[in-house]
Amino acid sequence: MIEHGSYEIELFKQVIIVRFFDAWNKETSLKMCEEFQREAKRITDNPWACIVDLTKWDFGGPEVWEPIVQVNDWCTENGQELEAVVCTNELQKYILEKTQKALPKTESAFFRTEIEAKNWLNKYGYKI
């Protein structure tokens, strides 16, 4: 099946920034998760953090969430210390707050802008 929606992933020292765009299908979710893990493996020798920017994401069906939940589990086991989620949609925030509970070793916080998220990570020593 053809992918719907897109994403971009950037790596800055011990921080991964992933931005989601448009509505996703499972193929996009699987591809993003695979690429995310590949990038994260480059920095798992030390604690690391992630910014997830959802401000331009239009969700997707329930099949989109399964790969994301699996990657969250992988992140917990591979040294992710902090996660800054950027979203302005209250439904997104509600769903993500529930999935964040599956990350007991990762401190999560929600922000309305990527600048706020970066400032929060900077307080913990993650300079971007």
Image (spheres, grey):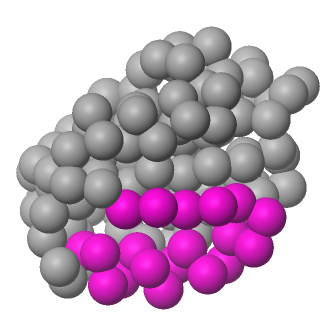
Percent position (x, y) of residue 106? 70, 60
Nearer the observer, 48 or 126: 126
Dividing the picture into quarters, in which one does residue 108 lie? bottom right
Residue 63 placement, left or right of 90 = right
Percent position (x, y) of residue 66? 51, 73
Dividing the picture into quarters, in which one does residue 118 lie? top left
The image shows residue 89, relative to residue 110, as above or below, that is: below
* Residue at 82% over, 44% down: 79
Residue 40 placement, left or right of 69 = right
Nearer the observer, 42 or 32: 42
Residue 121 placement, left or right of 54 = right
Percent position (x, y) of residue 12? 53, 15
* Residue at 11% over, 49% down: 56
The image shows residue 96, relative to residue 113, as above or below, that is: below
Number of callouts: 0
The image shows residue 4, relative to residue 40, as above or below, that is: below
The image shows residue 66, relative to residue 35, as above or below, that is: below
Q: Which residues are magenta?
A: 92-110
Is residue 32 part of the magenta span, yes or no? no
* Residue at 52% over, 78% down: 99
Given the current orientation, which residue lies at the most extreme front position? 123
Is residue 107 part of the magenta span, yes or no? yes
Asked if one can make out residue 27 in the rendered structure from this viewpoint, the answer is no
Percent position (x, y) of residue 8? 31, 29
Asked if one can make out residue 103 in the rendered structure from this viewpoint, the answer is yes
